[in-house]
């Protein structure tokens, strides 16, 4: 069985080459749930000034979503919404959005993508900015969903006394979402 492609330039690839790569990518994707969980675990470093670590913040956000009866997609979105902080502190939502987009409905993708902007409602006015900047999306069909995500779960999840569920509770949710066959969804879910 062929183990590497025959080409050095993609334009020279054959059907067999691309079938091999497709099989390899699908095999690699099976490990995605554990890689996502590893990224969440790495959030266990505090950014100075916050009363809880980024991991605890993420767990609290997901705990609140779970306790409010959110569906699996929103619970996982709540858990991973800040995983991009480590590599893209000023654009972290784009990282989380790219990770989750092929696996969830467009509404959830949009919420993750916009949550940073919507969160600015709670602090931007203290820094001389317009806290209502999110209102440029007021007519968007998912505006209220994102505002509720931030109000009910994200912005209130910095409480060291909150009864936060451990990561183990969320492992089955992550496994269900990121074990979906999303191979084709990446081309049809523009979000």
Image (tube, helix red, strand yellow):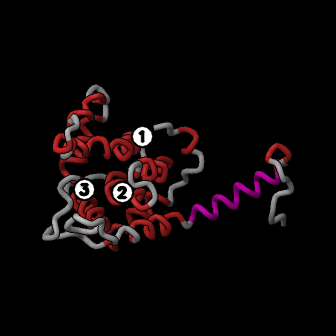
**Residue 13 placement (x, y as % from top left):** 83, 48
Does 157 appear above or below 126? Answer: below
- Secondary structure under tag 3 reads helix
Q: Earlier in the sequence, mark 3 or mark 1?
A: 3
* Residue at the image position 86 percent from the left and 46 percent from the top: 12
Task: Place residue 146 in its image quadrant.
Answer: top left
Q: Give the farthest residue toward the front.
A: 128
The quarter of the displayed image where residue 23 is located:
bottom right
Nearer the observer: mark 1 or 2; the answer is 2
* Picture layout, residue 102 above or below residue 38: above
Say if the magenta span includes residue 18.
Answer: yes
Q: Earlier in the sequence, mark 2 or mark 3?
A: 3
Residue located at (16% from left, 69% from top) = 160
Dot label at residue 106 = 1
Which segment did they paint magenta?
A: 16-30
Horizontal placement of 153 versus 25: left or right?
Answer: left
**Residue underneath mark 2:** 82
- Classify residue 152 as left or right of residue 59: left
Magenta stretch holds residue 140: no
Could you tell me what secondary structure mostly forms the magenta stretch?
helix
Q: Which residue is depicted at the point 23% across and 68% down?
A: 52
List the residue tagged with mark 3. Answer: 65
């Amino acid at each position: 069985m062929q183990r590497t492609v025959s080409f050095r330039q993609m334009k020279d690839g054959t059907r067999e080459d691309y079938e091999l790569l497709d099989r390899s990518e699908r095999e690699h994707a099976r490990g995605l749930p554990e890689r996502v969980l590893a990224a969440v675990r790495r959030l266990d470093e505090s950014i100075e000034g916050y009363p809880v670590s980024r991991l605890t913040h993420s767990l609290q956000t997901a705990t609140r979503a779970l306790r409010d009866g959110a569906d699996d997609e929103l619970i996982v979105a709540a858990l991973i919404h800040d995983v991009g902080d480590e590599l893209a502190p000023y654009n972290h939502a784009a990282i989380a959005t790219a990770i989750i987009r092929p696996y969830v409905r467009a509404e959830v993708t949009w919420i993750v993508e916009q949550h940073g902007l919507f969160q600015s409602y709670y602090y931007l006015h203290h820094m001389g900015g317009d806290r209502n900047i999110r209102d440029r999306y007021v007519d968007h069909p998912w505006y209220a969903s994102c505002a509720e995500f931030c109000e009910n779960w994200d912005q209130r999840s910095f409480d060291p006394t909150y009864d936060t569920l451990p990561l183990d509770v969320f492992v089955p949710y992550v496994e269900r979402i990121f074990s979906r066959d999303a191979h084709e969804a990446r081309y049809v879910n523009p979000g």
